[in-house]
Image (cartoon, rainbow, N blue to C red):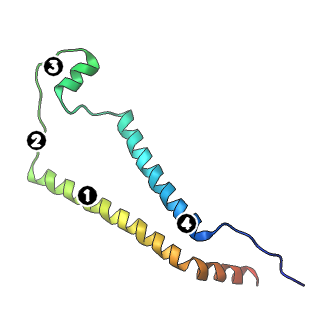
Amino acid sequence: MPQPSLTSPKRPLLLLVSLVLALGIGVGVAWLMTQLEPVFTNSAAVTAATGLQVFGVVSAAETAQSHQDARFRLIKLGFAVAGLFVAFLLVFLLHQPGSRLIHGLLAI
C-alpha cells in the first residue's frame, strides 16, 4: 500500500521568515513602549508638551557604577542576540535530521 504524500512549507524559508518576524515584533514592541511612556530629554521638550515655563533642570548624576551597569546591560543584549542567531543556525542546520527522526518516531 503506497504512503500518502505529505506536503509542507519549505522549512528553511519558514525558519527565515520566523526569525525576521520575531525580530520585527521585538523591535516594534520596544518602539511602542517608548511611545507609550515618553521621556523628556531637555527643558524645551517639556515646555513644548505642557506649555509651561521650566524654572530649573536637575541633570542625571552618572557615576562609574552607572556606566558599568549600562555596559553590562549592553553586553547581555549582545549575548541574547547572538544566542538567537546561534539557535536559528542550529535549527536551520538540523531541520532535516530532526524531521526524519520525528517522522520515524511517528511511523512506529
| Element assignment for label 1 | helix
| Element assignment for label 2 | loop
**In the displayed structure, does residue 103 sit left or right of residue 98?**
right
Checking the image for residue 61, the label placed there is 2
Task: Give the distance between the C-alpha atoms of the residues marked 4 and 1, in whole angstroms.
Answer: 27 Å
Checking the image for residue 15, the label placed there is 4
Inspect the image, locate mark 3, and give the three-letter code of the amino acid beneath it.
Val
Is disc 1 surrounded by few (<14), some (14 to 19) or many (20+) residues within 10 Å? few
Which mark is nearer the camera, 1 or 2?
1
Inspect the image, locate mark 2, and give the three-letter code of the amino acid beneath it.
Ala
Is disc 2 surrounded by few (<14), some (14 to 19) or many (20+) residues within 10 Å? few
Picture coordinates of residue 51 (x, y %)?
A: 25, 15
Circles 2 and 3: CB atoms closer than 8 Å? no
Q: Residue at x 80, y 75 (%)?
A: 5
Q: Earlier in the sequence, mark 3 or mark 1?
A: 3
Circles 1 and 2: CB atoms closer than 8 Å? no
Choose between 83 and 15: the one closer to the eye.
15
Q: Which residue is mark 1?
A: 74
Task: Give the distance between the C-alpha atoms of the residues marked 2 and 3, in whole angstroms.
Answer: 20 Å
Q: Residue at x 23, y 23 (%)?
A: 46
Q: Is residue 30 above or below residue 37?
A: below
Q: Which residue is mark 3?
A: 54
Q: Is residue 81 above or below residue 34?
A: below
Choose between 100 and 7: the one closer to the eye.
7
Picture coordinates of residue 104 (x, y %)?
A: 70, 84
Q: Earlier in the sequence, mark 4 or mark 3?
A: 4
Inspect the image, locate mark 4, and give the three-letter code of the amino acid beneath it.
Leu
Q: Earlier in the sequence, mark 2 or mark 4?
A: 4
Circles 3 and 1: CB atoms closer than 8 Å? no
Circles 4 and 3: CB atoms closer than 8 Å? no
